[in-house]
Amino acid sequence: VGKVRVDGDASALLELLESPGRSKDLLWEIKRRISELKGRQVFPAEEVQQIWAIALGLAERLLEMETTLQKREFQSRFRDVELEAVSHLGRVLASTFEVERLMETVLDLAVTISNARCGALWLFQEGKWEVVGVVGDAGLVVRQVLASAQVPNEAQLLPRASHRLGVALASDREVLGYLVVGDQERRRGVGPFRAEDRRTLELLANQATVALQNSYLHRQVVAQRLLEREIALASEIQRRFLPESLPQVPGLDIWAWNRAARYVSGDYFQFFVDPHASCLRIAIGDVSGKGVPAALLVSLLHSALVLLLRQDGFNGTLLSQLNEHLFSFTSKSKFVTLILAELDPEHRTLTYLNAGHPPGLVVRADGKVEELSAGGLPLGLFARGSWPMREVPFGEGDLLCLYSDGVVEAIDSSGVEYGAERLVHLLQGGKNVAVSQLGPTVAAALESFPVGGALEDDCTLLLVRFVARVA
Amino acid sequence: MSGALRVTVERRGHLACIRTEGYINNEGGEEVARAAYQLLDDGVRHLILDLSGSRIINSIGISILIEVLERLLASQGRLVFCGLTPTIEKTFQIMGLSQYATLLPTADEAWAALEAGG
């Protein structure tokens, strides 16, 4: 029996067996010693014991290594899961503008990747903080709202957690929301988050911020398109309340011009001719406000006016009845200025009523100008009022000019108003000119008046001249 | 999604289905494992895990489900997952669970598969 070498340095081998970090050295040593045993037939009992110890230690070490390998494979595969999840998030963010779905995906991912036990996602909307998603037992009532312009602290955002990690969803200019996760899970219990978890969360928050901004922008575009469609519709409706063509009344030369400052004008005018075309009735008005509400008020005014004229004709109580109607069906802040005029070429008269509208002008054949000054308050402001009816002569060569305030209140870049005087001057200069020529001259002068700018208010200008005696 | 995971169990002979509702994390995974081991101890041989009520699962939840799978495989049993969200299904494929367990769309299909295969 030869001398067993294992005897001599058993302690060195045992030391290696007890050193988990030196597995490679251990395996080399075992290999070397087993190689030395090759060919031997007889083993003393003591040596057999040592070989058993080595074999047991080896088995334990192999089991440890197998477990370590499994863990590493698990971690490696889970990193692939994380990459796939981030890729999935990218696809979701690119495929939808639905804020709720976007935020749910972001929160789910943040919680699972960071192995958090709970999490919440808050958005700052319309001046308050609102929780839009919760995972796990976060200690929150869903749809909780915090009325604060400041970013709340993380304990408010995730009350029940012991360890929290939060990042803001923020652009360069504003904070849009806050993503917070709580209590990182271990196999036993929970603990604080690591530095790399913050980096992952920041990556998710950055993506979520871009998606949120895109979503908000999309919302604005959709709202804008809706508004444009509504305005176009209102404009179409309102156009139906304006004359499609100029009426033909023997003895009268008629011209009209209307320009809306916006899509939908607050100005209104209409001509009414009786079945025999013996006289012309004119309405010109201006409703308060602009845009769609103004258009709706115009439609109310027009329908009431048509009904009253058809029912009772042109008479002194017309504006009282109209006022009653508008006062009943509009809010207190809404009102209408209106002139109603009736031109009777046969009797050469002009009869008018005025409710707070800029006074009409009559430029006589000899160039003298008269203001149609009688009138009362705008319609719709008070339950009752008084609007006197006046009649003035309207003979051959006389010119009636009715206009909205936008015509005389146009302002140039230095703040000077166009004014009634310039208008009168132009009208007097067109004494022998047909209104179809005079009108465009006046309109062109007005449009060129605001230096470097556009007319800010709606403009309506109506000209009617008595051109010939009616047989 | 509420705090704790809810588990409901349906048994048909040596088959059983565990349906989860909520986040499958450490606590949730342990809840599933407890239910599964109880069933296996009571003679159930094959198991369905219906995750249609669970939207998310974290790595610890997955590791616990892998342990349940290992226990079933060790006793020649089968595990069928069903009702998986696309995200969870993808996760199971990446983690290798789909190599050892069957993934089916619905619980009905899972029951049918186990009843046919025994």
Image (cartoon, coloured by chain):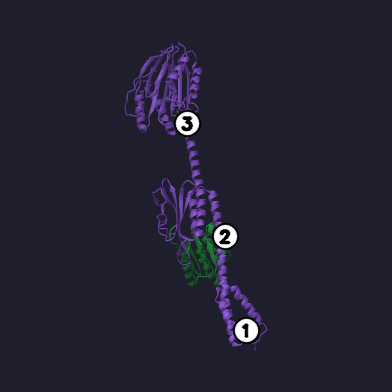
Chain colours: A purple, B green
Residue at label 1? A5
The 10 Å Cα crowd at callout 2, few under 14, some 14 to 19, many 20 or more, is some
Residue B96 coordinates in the image, percent (x, y): 57, 64
Q: Quadrant of the N terminus of chain A?
A: bottom right
Label 3: how many Cα within 10 Å (few below 14, some 14–19, many 20+)? some
Q: Give the quadrant of residue A126.
A: top left
- In this view of the protein, can residue A233 be seen by the observer? yes
Amino acid type shown at disc 1: Arg
Find residue A62 and report its image quarter: bottom right
The residue beneath circle 3 is A262
Name which of mark 1 and mark 2 comes first in the sequence.
1
Rendered location of residue A145, percent (x, y): 40, 50
Which secondary structure lies at badge 3? loop
Q: CA distance from mark 2 to mark 3?
A: 57 Å
Give, as a three-letter code, the residue at label 2: Asp
- The dot on residue A80 is 2
Q: Say whether mark 3 and mark 1 are on the same chain.
A: yes
Q: Residue furthest right?
A: A39
Q: What subunit carries mark 3?
A: A
Q: Is residue A54 above or below residue A402?
A: below
